[in-house]
Image (cartoon, rainbow, N blue to C red):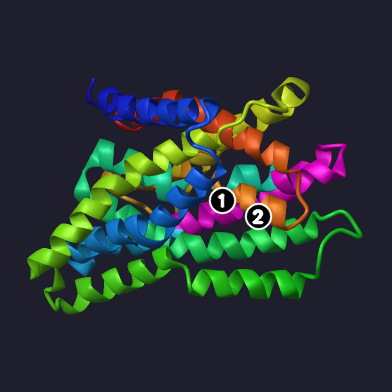
Amino acid sequence: MEFLGAMAPMAVFLAVGYILRKTGIADENAKNFLNKYLYYFAMPGLAFRSIASFDFKEAFVPGLVMQNLFTTFLVFIIMLGAVHLIKDASKRGSAHMAVYRSNQGYIGMYAVRSMYGELALSKSAVASGFDFPFVNILAVTGMELLRKRGEGGGFLKSAGRVMLKVITNPFVIAVALGMLESAVKTNVLGITAIDRTLELAGATALPLALVLVGASITFRYLKENIGLVAMLSAAKLILVPLAAYLSGVLLFRLGSADLSIGVTLMAAPSAVSGYVFAREMGGDQELMASCIGFSTVLSIATLPVVNILLNL
């Protein structure tokens, strides 16, 4: 089927990244370089061109944006209480973030474009652009609330540092500029050199992002914590998209096309960026890495299932 064909390259690029890491080719220096290329150039270029190439009224769907933010916040609140069932308090912050924080920018957008096309990618880029600053604010708040007493620096210091990163984030800036261009139509993409450069950057962004995710997957720690990791991954890949579906249908009355985009974005696995937050704010780094790897591998199977259910 078409959606299985769309997901097959995802598995290939993830496997390539994993093999490159295991063979020592994708060492930390290589991963740092690839991450900077994606962070500062390729992903912003993809986001800007995707949004700017469509009319703003098409790309900006208020209901889709609100459904995305609402679902993220709902899961954040529910998990804030649920993680207290975990006896080891040092694991709660990472367990919390592994469920509500979705890899929308890399895998979510890849799945949306593969399954639903370029206009859907544009809409998902706008939704993710609003989600990015919101989820980072939640990350600081959640990690601080669940931090073990005596760990790390203060909330205000962490919040200030992250907010600065949010407003200077290249992806957020690119989304804002793309929305502006889409609205005022200066026709900057009519300049062949600019359009072609951004097109080539976008063509490399998602495959290389998947390679980076594959190179970041680790299966250490799983043997001793497989039950917890499996439970958190199941919540991320099953319960979160279910919440997105219900909110999209019952609260925001999304049409079938926009509902599919919203649910697919929320059905993405745990975000790779969560590992950075866990390390910076005193969370369980190994638990976060295990959830990222486990949910990413499982999403190769669950995302097509989501697609089937949405098209019944």
Q: Is residue 248 visible?
A: no
Q: Is residue 219 visible?
A: yes
Residue 145 sits above or below residue 26 on the image? below
Residue displayed at 41% across by 38% down: 210
Residue displayed at 28% across by 71% down: 179
What numbered label is drawn on residue 305?
A: none
Residue 284 belongs to the span the image colors magenta:
no
The residue labelled by disc 2 is: 277
Task: Tell me which amino acid carries mark 2.
Answer: Phe
The residue labelled by disc 1 is: 273
Graded by Cα atoms within 10 Å as few (under 14), some (14 to 19) or many (20 or more), the crowding at tag 1 reads some
Residue 91 belongs to the span the image colors magenta:
yes
Q: CA distance from mark 2 to mark 1?
A: 7 Å
- What is the magenta segment's predominant secondary structure? helix
Quadrant, the C terminus: top left
Residue 171 spot, x, y in % from top left: 40, 63
Task: Tell me which amino acid carries mark 1.
Answer: Ser
Give the left or right position of residue 127, taking residue 102 as reference: left
Give the magenta range. 67-94
Question: Do residues under tags 2 and 1 come within 8 Å of each other at their CB atoms?
Answer: yes
Give the left or right position of residue 65, taking residue 82 as reference: left
Give the left or right position of residue 162, taking residue 245 as reference: right
Q: Residue furthest right?
A: 150
Residue 133 spot, x, y in % from top left: 52, 66
SS at circle 2: helix
Residue 267 sits above or below residue 192 on the image? above
Residue 11 sits above or below residue 273 on the image? above
